[in-house]
Amino acid sequence: MKRFDYYQPQSLKEAYSLMEKAAGSAKYIAGGTDILWRIRQKAVEPDALISLRAIEALRGISVNGGLSLGGMTLFREVERNPAIADKYQALTQAASLLANPQIRNVATVGGNLCNAAPSADSALPLLVMEAVLVLEGPGGAREVPIEHFFKGPGQTAMDKTEVLTQIKIPKGEPRTRSAFLKVGRLRQDIAVVNAAALVVMKGNLCAKCRIALGAVAPVPLRLKSVERLVEGQEIEPALLERAGEMAEKEVRPISDVRSTAAYRKAITRVLAMEAIKTAVMSAH
Ligand SMILES: Cc1cc2nc3c(=O)[nH]c(=O)nc-3n(C[C@H](O)[C@H](O)[C@H](O)COP(=O)(O)OP(=O)(O)OC[C@H]3O[C@@H](n4cnc5c(N)ncnc54)[C@H](O)[C@@H]3O)c2cc1C
């Protein structure tokens, strides 16, 4: 493994300045569960790692109106937060199914998003909840809706010096419920396919539907045609079947070590139906 320098700045300003000085040869490190593995694989070979761990401004969960997570929020903190479990069910479910407790004790939500794996578990609840990501660099802060953040496997809308400082999730309307489901080789493995759905129920009708699937395209994907099909409708078995069929047609999975493309398509159909159904059932 190539040797690298390690810095632990105490503030964002210090982190940006270290990153600017490195002129493209450094990487930020949060929990290190992705990046250290990639360094060992020689997939990336930075001259320096700039740790975000000591930066207090990147920590903390606040629930007032909406929900706000610091970029360095640990999955263990999300999993154990009762206010998140109450209002943002799919996020709690995704956090509790990510890897294992040892990984969840160090892995961050910011790291999961910035790593930009098509299978990233936190991406799907945050897509259906229409989260906004705050990206901050030496030039200031900007807000990017999560839908525009992922550009391809391992690629995001961030500049090299920018840090994902905050994840903002708007307050849901009354009777908003969400669900996250995941199929992996083992229960807490990286997903073969994962899915999240969010619904707002008005009487028996589904007034709003959001659905997103992972590991079936180069980026975590929202399925807007399925959302349009379901919105304004009563959720019945025939409608769920059509939603599943439509989802299967929309995705473009690949075959890799975890699964064949054909199996991923078949699972997409089932998970799309089940995610919507689970969210709707929890609303009653
Ligand atoms: C055994 C094992 C099992 C795993 N299982 C799962 C799983 O089930 N589901 C899943 O989704 N993932 C899984 N992962 C992947 C990984 O644990 C997660 O993606 C994790 O959330 C990464 O977070 P981290 O804090 O460790 O990121 P790091 O490894 O520290 O960083 C990842 C990337 O993001 C960048 N980065 C990190 N934070 C920021 C920030 N705030 N601003 C700008 N850039 C940043 C880094 O430069 C790096 O490129 C697994 C990993 C392992 C080793």
Image (cartoon, rainbow, N blue to C red):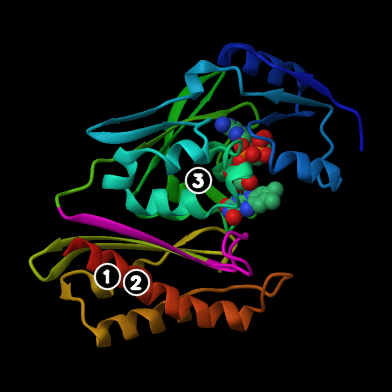
Spatial CA distance of label 2 from label 3 is: 20 Å
Residue at (44% x, 46% y) in the render: 146
Residue underneath mark 1: 228
Query: Label 1 sits on what residue type?
Result: Arg
Residue underneath mark 2: 225
Instruction: Write down the quadrant of residue 208 in the picture.
Output: bottom left
Is 143 on the left-hand or right-hand side of 101? left
Q: Position of residue 252 (x, y in %)?
A: 56, 74
Magenta range: 175-193
Secondary structure under tag 2 reads: helix
Residue at (63% x, 78% y) in the render: 261
Q: In which quarter of the image is ligand 1?
A: top right
Q: Position of residue 83 (x, y in %)?
A: 29, 39
Spatial CA distance of label 3 from label 1 is: 22 Å
Is 18 on the left-hand or right-hand side of 45? left
How many residues crowd mark 2 within 10 Å: few (<14), some (14–19), many (20+)? Answer: few
Could you tell me if residue 141 is visible in this image?
A: yes
Q: Which mark is residue 149?
A: 3
Residue at (59% x, 81% y) in the render: 263
Q: In this view, does 83 lie above or below 276?
A: above
Q: Residue 103 carries which label?
A: none
Spatial CA distance of label 1 from label 2 is: 5 Å
Could you tell me if residue 115 is visible in this image?
A: no
Secondary structure under tag 1 reads: helix
Label located before the other in sequence (2 or 3): 3
Q: Where is residue 188 in the image (x, y as percent from the top left)?
A: 58, 59
